[in-house]
Amino acid sequence: MIGREEAQRLLAKTLSLSKAEETQVNLRGETLHLTRWNNNHIHQNLVRRNTILTVKAIDGKRVGTASTNVLDEGSLRATVELAQRNAALQKPNPDLAPLPGPEPIPEVAGFVGRTAESSPEERADAAGVIITAAQKKGLTAAGTYSAEVEEMAVANSRGISAYNAGTTGFIRTIVNAGDNTGYADRMSRDTDDFDPAELAAEAILKATLRREAADLATGEWDTIFEEYAVADLIRFFGYIAFGALAVQEGRSFMAEVMGEKALGENVTIWDDGLDPRGLAEPFDVEGVPKRRVVIIDRGVARGVVHNTMTAAKEGRASTGHAAVSDWGDMGPMPSNMFLATGSSTKDEMVRKTKKGVLVTRFHYTHSPEPTRVVATGTTRDGTFLIENGEITTRLRNLRYTQSLIEAFNRVEAVASSARITRDWWSTFTSVLPAIKIGGFNFTGGTTF
Amino acid sequence: MPARGRIFASKRNEVSAEMRETLREVLELAKARGAGYADIRVVETRAEPITMRNGNVERISTRTGRGAGLRVLVDGAWGFASPTSMNREGLEEAVDLAVRVGRASARWKHGAGVELASEPPHEDRWENHVAKDPFEVKVEDKVELLTAATRAMTEVPEIKVTGAQVDAWETKQLFASTEGSFIEQRKVECGAGVMAVARDGHDVQRRSFDDYESRGWEFVEGLDLVGRAGRLAREAADLLKADVCPRGRTTYVAGGGMMALQIHESVGHPIELDRVLGTEATFAGTSFLTPAERGRFQYGSPEVNLTADATIEGGLGSFGYDDEGVPAQRSVIVEKGRFENFLMSRETATMFGVRSNGTMRAVGAHNLPLIRMTNVNLEPGDWTFEEIIRDTREGVFVETPKSWSLDDKRVNFHFGQEIAWEIKDGALGRMLKNPAHTALTPEFWGSMDAVAGRGKGEWKVHGTPGCAKGEPVQVIHVAHGAAPARFRNIKVGVGQ
């Protein structure tokens, strides 16, 4: 770890080297401990450490950036000079907003020493608990156990100086019973929250429940989605529709329905980067504090998330959702989505389903028609037929192709509890309940 | 050991004697600490992406990186650590950490432990051919190219959003192992792309293009980016008024760009032997193939011939040696429809008692190597594209992937495309929007009855810089040689 003092010293030093009108410096430090196992043995185990410093220089509405992971003074100076050179080579961008000024940064308790000090021995032991539980049932287990420290610091020439360190523990397993698999995962700031035996039991139950698999006829089925699966549905709204750039460019359905009913009345979605039930973090990559944004309120489209640039275009304040990716500026993105809970339970949803499907999770989902938020993907790790209120049959995995705008207008039940979960691609970490949707469109099946 | 400074001593990237001695000492230390085998990669990277959005330069960035990754086999199990600094203390600490991680892995190791397929030590130096160094091209000239491409798109009134980008990457790498290999490599890659979004108040449609090769700026100059941008923008506008691709079973003809992704997803990933053995189950998924199907499984029709060839000059998946020090190779994957070989590492090759075919690669210094695609190709056929269309009574011709989704064993897939044309009585007809197709992988390849490639430029290697795999995820550069190909009785128009 770099630590607050050293991080802020590096940022201040870098700022002092810049001659640009405005300068922003970001520092991201990572220490990742990660253990993977499969077929009841550990096959990968690593410690990855890196720190990247990025300089954004702005001169006359022209912006240039440069980054390095070599943090000696010569490299910092060279990086600043590259950023300034890159800015100087541009044409002015009239839409470029000034860097944000300082605001009070809320405190977020996201760092747990135990997670930061995760040892390879304790991760191997946790894997061993899961492997042993699988072996006792004649099954095999695969899994991943990671413990990560992420430090983020931002400083700019308008006075922002923000630092945060957070830890994230994540453990998951897939238990194999031939073609049948079962899945479970847990995420927490504190790896002490993990109970590998309980995790193994959940995955083993899923892998061994109703072993004889059947095919399902394609068509519309009332479907119950566990939290893992809900994460993969919600992520499409998040990256396609809930960012202000997508609205301003007319790519998001939200552009046409703001203030109007867009989804079902039992659907409320908001983003809250400060809520400790999620992976709370106090500020975004521009150093702007996270603000709670109500996106869908009882079905009505109420807002989208902003960064400084999209906010300036509408004469409003950033909501603290600036994001960057290796693929370029995707515009602001939600970071900590919440779906409001209802009054049902997963058991009750099953009991009240005459004929339907239970989906544990999805794999490799994508959107062939983003404007209508049409998504497709296949189920995995436990898909079941429900008949007369009971899980009666394991189903071979299914492909769905479905407009999620339409689907979220047909939400029939929402669970009363929510849990932190992330989608298969790790696009978002959200806090989500299980839900039931009427008439969900399954368009194909696979062979296992 | 050098406290700081350049890893590569001269402009020609030759390694200093001091660095060579440092790596030898690190590997000796790993052995002394208990490693039966160790290798280290020292990597310097440079990237210069420039992106333009709606006519404004969104980003001119220069990214540089430096670091090392140390891999050890201890008691028959793997450990890996990246040092926090390249000085003596940092490297020694990384050795101790990697060995400790390896010992922890050995608590749950596989049988008697990992064995590596035999590979002689190599001392070599490799770099790809670059006529015009993309880092020497003026940034102003790159911006001017993107500006001209954007102008060509915005001349079409329906175009409301535009994107354009150029990328250049340089990777310098040293590899040294306890078996005596010492390999220097330098690879320069570049490419460009454009994207136009048309909108009319009722619909939004997009057309895009990008391509990358392991070549210099001469590759970008040959792309005709401005000309393509204008054509794509007009197509995006025309798509607003096009009919939706009908649903049903028909003959499906895919262009080379679409075929590249089809190969990537439904051949390249399923033939990765680590996926076959289940080690990617928790994220990327596994494979419908089993080890027993090597040399036996009927992957497709007799027209299907596939190779993995890391030796193609200019291929984005080409290199001199993989990250285990195994030389780049050309492997037959499918011959006349029969599956012949997996992509392998030294560890996984031992199950067949063969040499690794050299596909272990890592992204940057801080990640451990995984089995990755190289240039995985559908070999050219003896048709021309015109002959395929003329020979097709009814069907659709599609191009440019828009979405891709596969199950976790790569059996059931669904791909959406940006654009299609109806094929009727041997000719291309009306434009169709929102095309998609879905099938099961072996059935799909089993239905292929024609591949183009005889016509000039029909078969080419398409660069794919965004192949994701592993935990933590590593996004690597691969490529696919492809030409238009025809498939019979495919379910198309699978929207919702």
Image (tube, coloured by chain):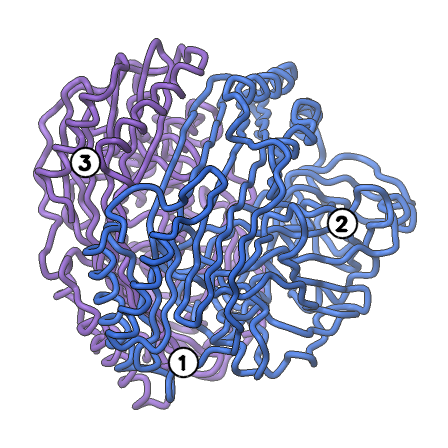
Chain colours: A purple, B blue
Kind of residue sitting beneath label 3: Ala
Kind of residue sitting beneath label 1: Val
Give SS at disc 2: loop
Crowding near the residue tagged with mark 1, few <14, some 14–19, many ≥20 C-alpha atoms within 10 Å: many
- Same chain assignment for discs 3 and 2: no
Which labelled disc corresponds to residue B225?
Answer: none
Residue receiving disc 1: B114
The chain carrying label 1 is B
For the point 43% across and 29% down, the residue is: A246
- Same chain assignment for discs 2 and 1: yes
Asked whether the residues under the numbered discs 3 and 2 touch, taking CB atoms below 8 Å apart as contact, a structural biologist would say no
Residue A173 in percent (x, y) is at 32, 71
- Same chain assignment for discs 1 and 3: no
Q: Is residue A148 left or right of residue A63?
A: left
Where the N terminus of chain B falls, by quadrant? bottom left
The residues tagged by marks 2 and 1 sit, at their Cα atoms, a distance apart of 40 Å
The residues tagged by marks 3 and 2 sit, at their Cα atoms, a distance apart of 48 Å
The residues tagged by marks 1 and 3 sit, at their Cα atoms, a distance apart of 41 Å
Q: Quadrant of residue B400?
A: top right
Q: Quadrant of residue B134?
A: top right
Which labelled disc corresponds to residue B483?
Answer: 2
From this view, report whether residue B266 is shown above or below residue B171: below
Which sits in the foreground, B492 or B46?
A: B46
For the point 26% across and 82% down, the residue is: B107
Residue B381 in percent (x, y) is at 83, 56
Q: Is residue B164 left or right of residue A42?
A: right
Crowding near the residue tagged with mark 3, few <14, some 14–19, many ≥20 C-alpha atoms within 10 Å: many
The chain carrying label 3 is A
Residue receiving disc 3: A153
